[in-house]
Amino acid sequence: MITRSARVVVPGTEEAGITLVTRRGGFQSRAATSKLPTLIDDLQYRLDDGPCVQVIWHHDTVLVTDMATERRWPRFAPEAAGIGARSMLVFPLYTTEKALGALSLHSSEADAFDETAVSIGSTLATHAAIALITCQREEQFRDALISRETIGQAKGMLMQRYSIDAAQAFTLLVTRSQHTNIPVNEVALHIVEHGPDPAK
């Protein structure tokens, strides 16, 4: 796991976490090595401010040497210091197309991260971004296979129920999707789970 590796290979790192951008533009904490990264993320989500938010939207690495004297985020920094994050080093996780999120490294000590930490952490963040892209593509592929299978089952049920062919069954699925403003795969799933009668 990337965050566990960060604790071992990046000097000064005590805890680590990943913040991901969701499909709806929100944020989600993943792979935290303790409660601290999640608490820091929750604080940033609540305030919509902080180093992870800045990194995700601006794609720049951010180093916080001492949260107790940090002035860039006047609402976030004092609370983060109170939680126990004195130093933070945050790297963007992104592709050429979009921001995926951020890799954040934490320390309870001030001035915990040096140039070596920045260099090693940057390399680790690149590997993390590649791993995330791979996982997302695998998830999308699995979702597509599941949707295809579900649509096939729903078509079969409609064909049997209404004595129609495959093309007519698919047209019926699309029509129901348009009338209900629900994606075709969700209409198909409802048919598989509840039967082809639209009243059910």
Image: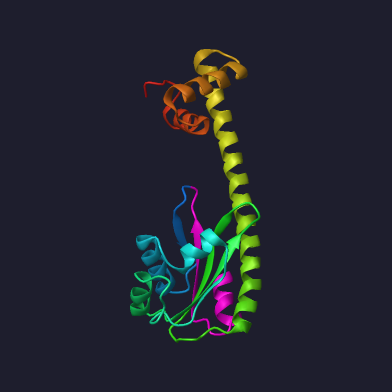
Q: Nearer the viewer, residue 28 or 67?
A: 67
Residue at x 63% of width, y 56% of height = 133
Quadrant of res 196: top left
What residue do we see at 37% from left, 21% from top?
Answer: 199
Q: Position of residue 27 (x, y in %)?
A: 45, 57
- Quick one: 189 or 78, which is closer to the camera? 78
Q: Which residues are magenta?
A: 1-23
Q: Quarter of the image for the N terminus: give it.
A: bottom right
Q: Is residue 196 magenta?
A: no
Q: Quadrant of residue 148?
A: top right
- Please provide percent x and percent y for residue 115: 61, 83
Q: Is residue 30 among the parts visible in the rendering?
A: no
Color scheme of the displayed model: rainbow
Q: Residue at x 55, y 75 (%)?
A: 4
Q: Position of residue 118 (x, y in %)?
A: 60, 78
Outermost residue, top side: 163
Relative to 99, residue 176 above or below: above
Q: In the rendered view of the protein, which quadrant contains the C terminus? A: top left
Tally of numbered tags: 0
Query: Camera-side residue: 143 or 166?
Result: 143
**Horizontal side, residue 80 vs residue 167: left or right:** left
Q: Residue at x 63, y 45 (%)?
A: 141
Asked whether residue 16 is drawn in magenta, I would say yes
**What percent of the width, then of the height, locates residue 173?**
52, 23
Work out whether residue 65 can be spotted. yes
Q: 94 left or right of 14?
A: right
Q: Determine whether 112 is above or below 192 in the image.
A: below
